[in-house]
Each structure stands twice: as structure tokens, then as C-alpha cells.
Amino acid sequence: MKDLVRILIGPLVWLSAFSAVYGLHGVACAFGWADIDAWGLSLMRVALTAAWLASLAVLAVTVAVLHSRRFGSPSGFVRGVSIMTGWVGLMATLWTLFPVVVTSTCQ
Amino acid sequence: MRTLERHRRLQDIWASERGWKGWTSSVNHTDLGRMFLVTSFFFFAVGGVLAMLIRAQLATPHSAFAGPELYSQFFTMHGTIMMFLFAIPTFEGLAIYLLPKLLGTRDLAYPRLTAYGYWCYAFGGTMLLVSMVLGIAPNGGWFMYPPLTGPIHSPGINTDFWLIGITFVEISAMAAAVEITVSVLRYRAPGMSLDKMPIFAWYALVTAIMILLGFPPLILGSVLLELERAFGLPFFQVELGGDSLLWQHLFWLFGHPEVYIIFLPAAGVISTVLPVMCRTTLLGYGWIVAAAVALAFLSFGLWVHHMFTTGIPHMGLAFFSAASTLVAVPTGVQVFAWIGTMWKGRPDLRLPMLHILGFFATFVMGGLTGVMVAVVPFDWQAHDTAFITAHLHYVLFGGFVFPILAGVYYWLPHFTGRQRFFRLGEVAFVLIFLGFHGTFLAMHWVGLLGQRRRIWTYETSDGWTAINLVSSVGGFIMAFGLAIVLIEVVLCFFVGRRMPRNAWGAGTLEWAMPTPPPNYNFASVPHIRDRDPLYANPGLPVQIARGDGYLGTPRHDWRETLTVEAARGTPDYIVVYPANTRLPIVMSAVTGLFFLSLLIKVYWFTPVALAGVAVLALRWVWVLGQRQDRGPLDAGLGVSLPHAAEVDRAPGWWGSLFLLVADAVLFGSLIFGYAFLFTVAPGWPPPAWFEFSLLELGGGVAGALAAAAGMRLAIRANRRGGSAWTGLAIAGAGALVVLLSLAALLVRTPPPSGHAYNATLFVLGGYGVLHTLIPLLMLGFLAARVSRGFVSAARRAELPIAGLWVDYMAVVAILVLAVAHLPGVAP
């Protein structure tokens, strides 16, 4: 079962991050974070960007772990597939959540 | 033992009853797979007739063929039948028939569950057909948006048929998903490690996991909408704190993954059939597995692209637009791997290959229009037009029906033992291909000209007449083609020539048995050393028949197979299946009475039916197990394995685990709904929060923790040869305290019809109570089993199963009590 977890973990972390950031976006709009100033930006932009960067960091660590000898699969096949799906998670996080830094927030 | 004698012994043990009685008592996957497929293609025919009625109506402006009410029923039932009664059950049927044969085992993990799932599907589908015959079929569109489908705008019983009938049918999908997941992970031939699994098994596994994660939001949405319709709980009524957008979220959380739940099994068929048609092996096996996993997960991040026109903020739109474009990448990886496979081999244009080529042309076009509608500004223009209808048919017909027809023709000799005699299939393919593109290319065009979907008529001055006529003519040509397929399949059963074994020259294990297959599949379970076992060892069928594998000598009249460790495929333990029984059909009939009582609003009968289901469920599990320790059993090839009753992680534990994963998704969706209404719905905050009670919260949390600790104590004591009674008593007492805390929540919740907040608390409390009653029932069952001598230090498998449910109860109870009590503490 550990090998199955290795294969699923990358996309699963992306799905969690994606849902969490979308949820945070809803909460931030509901509570007016877009109008609260934080270091010259809106609190919403800061929070969402921080969440995005944290997600990227978690995915980067996940990929590194899947590459490592200690935690990577002893099976060459599972190792290859899990590294591929790990990269899918990382690239998906980069692509699907980059709107946090470029689009308008609650309009 | 001689080969023929072995065959006769196994046939006696595994045979189903003869004649129609056998249909009601068989638990064999070959029988049930065939029954699933025949039923699903019957529904395909019904859905096809409805499609023809739709095209007849739209062929000319101001058609007098059908009025708006009837037309609404046509398109609603067409979509509903094709999605829920054809596509998903066809996957279930194909997987149920094929998987054990591909995996080198004798049946699926839970044969009686297979039968229960089939009968729930058959009875639920019949319920929907009856509504159609009576003229009171669902009429709100296949995605049933409130407020149109709410009690104010749809007061009749039509919508209830959909909500209750589909939920009944979905029991079948959930049962199949649990079954397939456990079967692929654990029920394989020894030696078949993950890298040696047939590619269809990977696709089936990924699809089954998607069903486990994707269907619960729909089931929850259906329950909530039915509660609103029947009892006035206002989840979707804005003036009482609800929001109709909540339905759209819950529906599309299911609805978009559903597209891939339909496509991925078809891609599994392509990946299996294409290499055989090209006389080679699949190119990029690992890449395809990774792409299927990626596609499955990415598909859960697309649901809002069905809601681009609902006024969601730009940032939200951008998230889902980006995810929608991204999904083209893993799809493209698979398409290029298939193209590479063709390039590597020598394609042979036999009939399955023609349908695969039809798939390529159609699906790629559907995928490209999918990228178009993933772009928000284009979607705003095309939303709810015939362009969208055309796009989804390119994806679903191209991505599912063409591959399934390829699969039907490929495995037809396996189902029947015969090969086609008349060459009707080639004519049928041409008619289907031309008819399909005639229908739906035209529909793209008329959609871009502004024709909305689901309109029952239009004006001559709209300029759509000729295009609609072309589309309707194309539809009828396609229908002729599909009718010819049906005729040819029926003819093949009666007048086809005998098929030699493995006539396609395939490398997968389903061709290592005689056709049509015997009920036991394999006379002995082979040891697998290669991904294409028949290519690596052409003599394998003879060795299997000769009993040279595992479990080659029948004993005790047991229906035996063995399980393996999930990753490496090393033998794990021996499973003895239950024999033929009518328990599944009876239990699904009683389950149907439960749903019927809700439908016709005879609510006094609902708890009676539920009690009936509980009694039958207890009977279901009581007949399993044994009263004596058996120790290691000879599995053949010098291997001894324990009986499934004498392990920690028995099949029931694995099934419970995956069922609870789905259950947790449903619970998570309910919490999501609460959070959504809390933050987005206009009628919040509610008039009053639920009043905090330290006694109820603290008592419930303590009870939950005690129950979980008690079960651990019982499991540990039993394993050491001690008594499990103390632990069971603590667990039971803890669960009772939890029940009291949750009952108090239900009693103290303000009237649920007053505000969506109250309604949400009521449902949360009800969910908690249900998930406390189930473990309590299990603890009572365990107590009876211990006292009757079914449990010993060796025969320990049943305790951890109940332990899983108690743990789940504890988590749910703590979360429910927390979200109910804590908002009342905040200033």
C-alpha cells in the first residue's frame, strides 16, 4: 500500500492545496480581506500568495522525498511513476494557482 | 488429479443454478458481468430512442410532435439514462466480467456485493423507467438545478423519482467501486506486481477510486434536495439562508470527474485492444499509468468550469480555467502513447481497430472544443447553447461509445465462444461514424448561431431549420448503425462459428481459458512473471488446466482463491467465497422498499425497511467465518497460507476502509456545504446560534475517545489469547454516550425548516447518529460472535473491522459536536 500512496501523493497534495486556496479565497472575500492593507498590498493578496508559495514548497519537498533513496520506492517502476505524478502535482500547483498574483480578487 | 476430473470438480463447486433461477441466485462475476452489460445496453437502447424523439422534435420548427412538458422529460431522461444507467454500469459490467480473468484470479473480492449492486441497479433503473411509462418522469434536466427543481417550481413527483431513483442506483456504483479497488489491489495472481498488472486493471483501479471520491457529493446533494422537497429544509432557498449555487457545487464536484470516470475505462479498453490490433505491445506503459492518475486527480479541480456564468469572482474563474486547460496534457500523453504504439506495430484494420480510429478522430475533436470552453470568455458566449451539447457528445460518444464498441467486438468471442459470421459490423461502423458526425458537427454550428440547449421548438426566422434537419437525419443514420450492431451481437450468440482459443493472439490472461469461460476461470491460479503472460509463456493455458499453479486441487467443496500483497504480488492468504444465494436480491428489494417508501411518502414504513436491511446485513455477515482454527493451508507450489479469518487485514477490513473513504468524502462535502453557506449565502448569520453545552460536547468527545480506546483494548486482548469482553464493553459504553450527545444535538436544534443553519445542524446530527448506530450494531454482532465461538486468538479478523467503524464514529462525532457547539461560544 505504501507504493500506492507514493503514486497518489503528488496529485493528492495538489488537490488539497487547490481546494484550500479556493476555500481561502472564498473566506477572504466574505470577510473583506481585500480591503485590509498589509505591507502595501491587500491582506487577501498576501494570504493567498503565501498559501500558494507554501503549497509549492510542500510539493517540492514531496518530489524530493520521492526521489530520495530513503523514502522512494524500491520498485523501479513505482519509483518512476511516483516521480512523474509528483511532478504533475508540482506543475499543477504552479499553473492552476498562479492567478493569485495576477488577477483581481473579489470582482 | 486428471485435467478433466479437475474441471468437473471445480464446475460442480462453482456452477450457478440452471435456468432463470440462476439469475436470481448467482454470485459469480461472469454471470453478473454479463447481466450488467445486457441491462446497460438495454438502457442504451432506451436512451437512444429518447434521443431520436428529441431529434424528431427539433427536425423542423414548430413541430407538433411533442409539447414542452413531454420534451422536457425526453431530454432529462435521455441524459439521465445515458450517464447513470448506461455509461457507469457498462464500466461496472465490463470490469466485473473481465477483471478477475485479467488478474488471474477466480472471482472478485465480494461476490455477493456484486450481485447486490446489480439488483440495486436493475430495481433503481426500473423505478425510473416506470416513471417514464406513467408520464411523470423527471423533467428538470439531467443536472436538476434548483430552484427549478425545488418544491415551489417543481411540486410534482417527477424530481423525486430522479433524486431517489438515482441515489438507489448509485449504491450499485459505490459497491462496484469498493469491489474493484480491493480486487485490483489484493486479488491477483501471485507474482503480478504493480508493474506487471494489465493496463486495464490500472484504469479500473483509478476509475474506482474516482467513483469513491466523486459520487458522494452527488448523493449528499440528492439527499439535501429531497429533504428540502419533502420536509422543507431550506438548503437551496435564499430567503431562508440557503443558496441554489450549493447544489451546483455539489453536483459538479461529482459531474466533472464523472466525465473522466466514463472516459478512463474506455481508455483502458483502447490501451488493451490497440496493441493486439497492431501486433505489438503498449508503448509507454509507465507514462500511461502516470497520465491516468494525473487525469483522475486533475479532473477534481475542474468542477467550477460548469459555473463560469454564475458570477464567481475573476480569480476563482482563473483557477478553474487554468486547471481545465491543464487536463489536456495527460490526455495528450495517452493519445501520443497510442499513436506511438500504432507506429511501433503493424496495424491491422479489423473491426475493433475501426472503432478505435473512430475514437481517435472524434475524441480529439471533442478535446479541442473542450479547451475552447475552458477559456472563460468563449464559455460565456457558448454556455447553455447547442455547442456545449455537441462538445459533450464528442467527448462522451467519442471517448466512450467508440472504445466500448471496439471492446464489444474484441471480447465478443470471449463472451460467447463464437465469432461473427455475417460482416454487418463494418457497415454499422460506417453508419455510426457518418451519422454521429452529421448530427453533432451540425449541432456545433447551430449552437454558435445561438440555438440554446433544451429548447423544444424554434422559429423559421431563426435560420436554424436546415442545420437541425441535417442533424436529425444524421441522428437517425447513427441509430440504424447501432441497431445493426445489436442485431449482429444477437446473431453471434446463435449462429456464430466456434472461436479457437485466443484467436486475436493476445498476451493477457483472459485468453488463457476456454471460451465461453468456466465459472471458476482458472483450474489453477498461475504464477505471473511477465506483463503479457501469454506472450512470455504460450504454454501457460495448458499448465493452468493441468493444475500446475496454486489451488489446483479442490478441497472441502470450497470456492477458493488467494490474495496477494498489493505492491509485490507475493501470496498473502486464502479466501473461501460464499456459494450461490438469493440474499443479495432480497436485500436489494428491501433496500428498494426503503427508497419507495420515501418516494410515495409512506414514512411510517421507512424505519421498517431500514430495520429489514439491518437484519439482512447481519444475516449476510453471520454466515461467514468459522468455529475452529485451521492454521496454514496448502496453497500449492510448496506454499502454505492462512485462512482469511485468521489474519488482521481480512477482505472485510479492506472493503470497510475504502467504503469509509467514500463516507468521509460525503461527510467532508457536508462540512463544505456548511462552510459555503456560512461564508457565501446572503441570509447569514442565522437568527441564533446553537447554544453551547460543555456537558454535551465534553461528554461526546470523552465517549468517542473511550470507544476507540476500548476497541483497541479488545483487539489486543484477543490477539494475546485473553478476553475481548472488557474492551467491547468500554467501546459500547463510549458509543452510547456519543449517541446521547448527538441525540441532544438533534433535540435542541431549532426547527430545521426555519433556516439553512438549523437544517445543516440537523443533518450533521443525523449523520452522526447513523454513524454511531452502525458501530453499536457491529459491537452487538461481535458480542454474539464471541459468545458463539467464532472468535479466537487465531480467528481475529472480525475485531479490526469493527475497530475501523468505531474509529470513524469517534472522528465524526468529535467534528460534528465541535462545529455545532463552538460557533455558539464566539462573541
Image (cartoon, coloured by chain):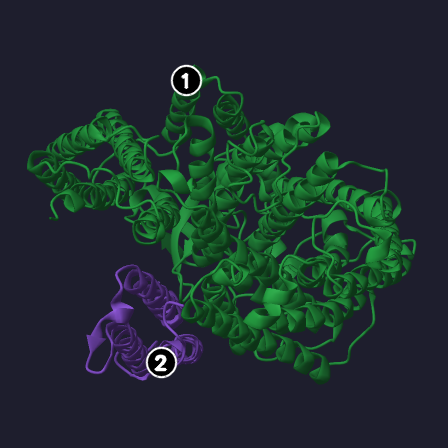
Number of other residues with Cα within 10 Å of mark 1, as a class: few under 14, some 14 to 19, many 20 or more:
some
Left or right: residue A78 versus residue B334 is left
Q: Which residue is painted at 34% across and 33% down in the image?
A: B626
Q: Is residue A28 above or below residue B740?
A: below
> What tint does the image give chain B?
green
Left or right: residue B351 versus residue A43 is right
Q: Which residue is painted at 69% across and 77% down in the image?
A: B280
Identify the disc placed on residue A101: 2
> What tint does the image give chain A?
purple
In terms of depth relative to the viewer, which is nearer, B361 or B207? B361
In terms of depth relative to the viewer, which is nearer, B581 or B233? B233
In terms of depth relative to the viewer, which is nearer, B580 or B62? B62
In terms of depth relative to the viewer, which is nearer, B816 or B631? B816
Q: Quadrant of residue B306?
A: bottom right
Q: Is residue B537 above or below residue B7?
A: below
Residue B778: percent from left, percent from top = 28, 32
On the image, numbered disc 1 is attached to which residue?
B608
Q: Amino acid at mark 1?
A: Val
